Amino acid sequence: MSDTIAHEASVIGPADPAAFWIDTPEHRHGLRADAGRQLDFFRNSFRPEGGFYQLDANGAPLRDLPQELFATTRMVHSYALGALFGFDDCERMIDHGLKFITEAHRDPVHGGYLWSLRDGEICNDQKLAYGHAFVLLAAASAMQAGHPDARPLLDDITSVLLERFWEDDAGLFADEANRDWTPFSTYRGFNANMHATEALLTAFEATGDRLYLDMAGRILDFFVRRKATANDFRIPEHYTQDWTVDHSYSGDPMFRPSGTTPGHSFELARLLLQYWDLSGRKDDDAPAMARSLVERALADGWDTSSGGIIYTVDFNGNPSVTARYWWPVAEAIGVFAALIKLEHRATDEDWYRRLWSFAETSFIDRKTGGWYPEIDANGAHTDHQFIGKPDIYHALQADLFPLSPKLSNIMQTGD
């Protein structure tokens, strides 16, 4: 199905206070328009030699930057979403990305998938669970989009994850190893496990294999029912080898900042609802647990003076890194869409509108396409942490998730 929505349409829905935007044609048209702009913009990342470029704010390739595994795989997932929601010309990007994952990122010597490459040479040969989780997500999404090479990739990455990262006693994934799988740290972390949960749920939707669902359930049980509930519904990010919270840890400022990350709570809350739905809605407290995660993240993260969601807080909820990025807003939109699908509450609608209004004025580039990734203290676009427009994944999902009436299996229905 081709997309006929006016490209310049806004995501802002009608002013009617009684309406729920996800039910209105105005808002839904705006979501499809923004998704179309994003898919058009990021087609510029196509690298003829293989894989994808990162793009500057105007869509020009940044040719000197390395090609990282999480970026390659997110592109495949995003264009698989686009194809499944009826957008044209997505298959070329899916096919191109899958080839690069299997022919360039895959390690022919030791197995698994290499973190980054530049001009065909290895930049970083570490094996990270975070990147491998996104390989599973890309394979599962491409499988749902009907790509013939997706199933072999899904089988391979499943074997790697089980053999190299999964710790069955804990029911969680370890984080990192050298290229030859020898250990170089005892770090354990939430972020890789959260994205592994996302990938496992998608793999279950693609295959029906309960192994994926059961693994996702074990991860969610640990982080939601054990760790979040013990920490006032803040999720500790960093752990020691025996899965004890490491309160003093501070690593990479983007992937492993100290403290807790409100944006991740929005993501995990939505995944909890997806798991609950796929499991037959057996645990009646799952929606309440998801709501507790969301409410804590909003209380800690929402910038009451200027809007937006700050990046990190400490274990008492005090602001730590106050930078405001696009992705926590996109993830908050996703979970509020899920909550509204479950139950039409006026307070959830208020937040849904507030988040989209902030995204429209602060991040969405309706002229060029894509979302700006960061704003400074004055609300101006800045490149302090990010270069250009680094990612389609979070913002595209914010556009597309509300278009499905479902909490799970959203890729099986378009608009």
Image (tube, grey):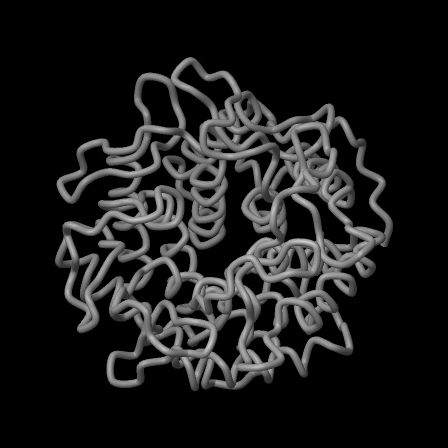
x 40%, y 28%: residue? 308
Give the image location of residue 187, x and y in percent: 27, 64
Give the image location of residue 184, x and y in percent: 32, 69
Out of 122 and 386, give the one closest to the viewer. Answer: 122
Q: Quadrant of residue 230?
A: bottom left
Q: Is residue 158 left or right of residue 100?
A: left
Give the image location of residue 64, x and y in percent: 66, 42
Out of 141 and 25, give the one closest to the viewer. Answer: 141
**Image vertical order of residue 147 relative to residue 334, above or below:** below
Out of 344 and 198, give the one closest to the viewer. Answer: 198
Question: Total marks drawn?
Answer: 0
**Image vertical order of residue 313 relative to residue 374, above or below:** below
Q: Quadrant of residue 121?
A: bottom right
Q: Is residue 109 left or right of residue 376?
A: right
x 59%, y 62%: residue? 122
x 76%, y 59%: residue? 50
Out of 238 and 13, give the one closest to the viewer. Answer: 238
**Image vertical order of residue 277 relative to residue 17, above or below:** below
x 24%, y 57%: residue? 238
Give the image location of residue 210, x and y in percent: 47, 85
Q: Is residue 239 left or right of residue 209?
A: left
**Image vertical order of residue 268 relative to residue 378, above or below:** below
Q: Quadrant of the N terminus?
A: bottom right
